[in-house]
Amino acid sequence: MTRSRLFWGTIAPLAAILNSLLLVYLILKFRGVDPIEMFKLMASYGFDPRNLVSELNQTVAYYMAGVAAAIGFKMLLFNIGIDGQYRMGAFFGGVVGAAVNLPPILHVVVIIITAMLAGGLWAAIAGYLKVKRGVNEVISNIMLNFIAAAIIAFLLSPSLLGILPEGSQTLQTREIPASGRMPTIKAFEGEIYTFFFIALVVGVAYWVMLNKTVFGFNLRATGLSFRAARASGVNAPRMIFITTVLSGAIAGLVGIGTLLSDTHSYSMAFPAGYAFTGLSLALLGRNHPIGIFFAAFLWSFLERSAPVLEFEGVPPEIVIVMQGTIVLSIVVAYEVVARINLRQQQRAVGSVNVESPVAKEAN
C-alpha cells in the first residue's frame, strides 16, 4: 500500500506538469511558433550557469513560502497571509539588524529570530480571530496583508524608521552592518546565498516535527478531524492557533536571504506574491519538504526563463499560464489519486474480511 501511494504521489505532479506543457504546446502552435524549439530555448537559457545562481537564490525564498503554506495545510488552514508576514519579518529584521551592534554570528541569529517573531506575531492576529471569533483565516489574512504593507510604508518615513538614500527615490531601512550580513558562495559564475543551508535546516526540522514528535502527531490528527482530536484529548483550538503562529514564523524568513546577502536593507521594492506562490508550491510538493524544494526550483526556473520568450516574439506571460495550469492540474490529479487509494483500501479491507475465520464460520 505504501509503494502504491508513493507511485501515485509521484505520477500526479508529473502528470500535472505534462498537462501544462501540452496546453502551452497547443497555444504556441496556434501562434505559429515551434513549441519544441521554444522549450529547448527556455531550457538552454534556464540552465545557463549565470542564471542558475539567480534561480537557486529565488528557490530559497519560494521554498520558505512553500514550507510556511504546508504547515498551514496540515491543519487545513489556508495561510494566504504569507505576504504580510514575510514583509513584517524582513522589515523588522532589517530595522533591528541595523540598530544593534553584535558579534557576527550572534548578530545574524538576532535578525533571524526577530524576523520569525515578527512574522509569527502578525500571523497570531489571524489565529486569534479564527479561534476566538470564528473569523475565516482567508478573509483576515487578506486584510492583514494590506494592513502590513500600509504600516510598513508609514514606518519607512525618514522621520521614523526609514531613510531616503541620496540619488534614490525608494525609502528603505538603514543598512545592516557587516557583522549582521551572511556571506555568499561563489559558484556558477555568481554568488549563492548561504541562507540556502538554513532553508535546508528548516525543511528537515519541519519533517522531524511533523513525523517524529507528539506535537506533529496532534497537528496531523487535528487537521484530519477536529472532533476526533478533541475526543482523544487534543486541544484543537490551541493547535490551530499554534500552527498559525508557526506558519507565520516560517513566512517571516522568506525575505531574509535577500536581506542578509544582497540588499542589506528592506524597502518597498521587495517583491510581493509569495502567498499564492507558497500555496501553489505546497500543493505541487505534496506538503513534503523535498517535493516543495523541487517545486520551488521549477517555479524559479520558469520565471527566469520567461524573458527569453519575448526576444522570440512570444509573450512571457505564457509562463504564468503554465504555472496556473500546473496548479489546476495538480488539484485534479490529487483528487483522482485520493479516489484510487480509497478504492484500493476498500478492496484490501474486503479481501481481509473474506479470508478471516469469522467470515468463514458465518458462511
Image: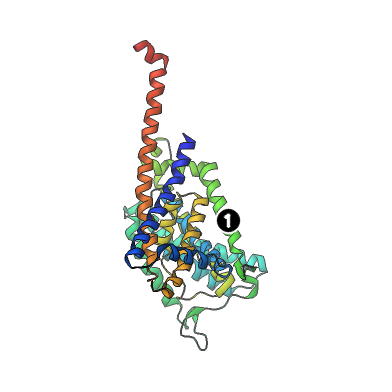
* Residue at x-position 38% and y-position 53%: 19
Which residue position holds label 1?
Answer: 200
Can residue 85 be seen at all in this image of the molecule?
Answer: no
Residue 340: % across, % down: 37, 38
Q: Is residue 354 above or below residue 157?
A: above
Q: Within the image, what quadrant is residue 33 found in?
A: bottom left
The colour mode here is rainbow
Q: Is residue 89 above or below residue 281?
A: below
Q: Position of residue 165 (x, y in %)?
A: 52, 85
Residue at image position (45%, 39%) is 5
The count of marks equals 1
Q: Position of residue 260 (x, y in %)?
A: 58, 70
Nearest the eye: 325 or 233: 325
Mark 1: few, some, or many residues within 10 Å (few <14, many ≥20)?
some
Asked if one can make out residue 97 in the rendered structure from this viewpoint, the answer is yes
SS category of the residue bearing label 1? helix
Nearer to us in this view, 113 or 349? 349
Camera-side residue of 22 and 213: 22
Please indicate whether residue 192 sits to the left or right of residue 312 in the image.
right
Which residue is depicted at the point 38% across and 51% down? 330
Can you name the residue that lies furthest to the bottom here? 167
Q: Would residue 186 be found to the left or right of residue 116 on screen?
A: right
Residue type, mark 1 in image: Leu
> In the picture shown, does residue 155 fall above or below 48?
below
Q: How far across and how far down the image is residue 21, in percent?
A: 40, 57
Q: Given the current orientation, which residue lies at the most extreme right position?
A: 103
Q: Quadrant of the C terminus?
A: top left
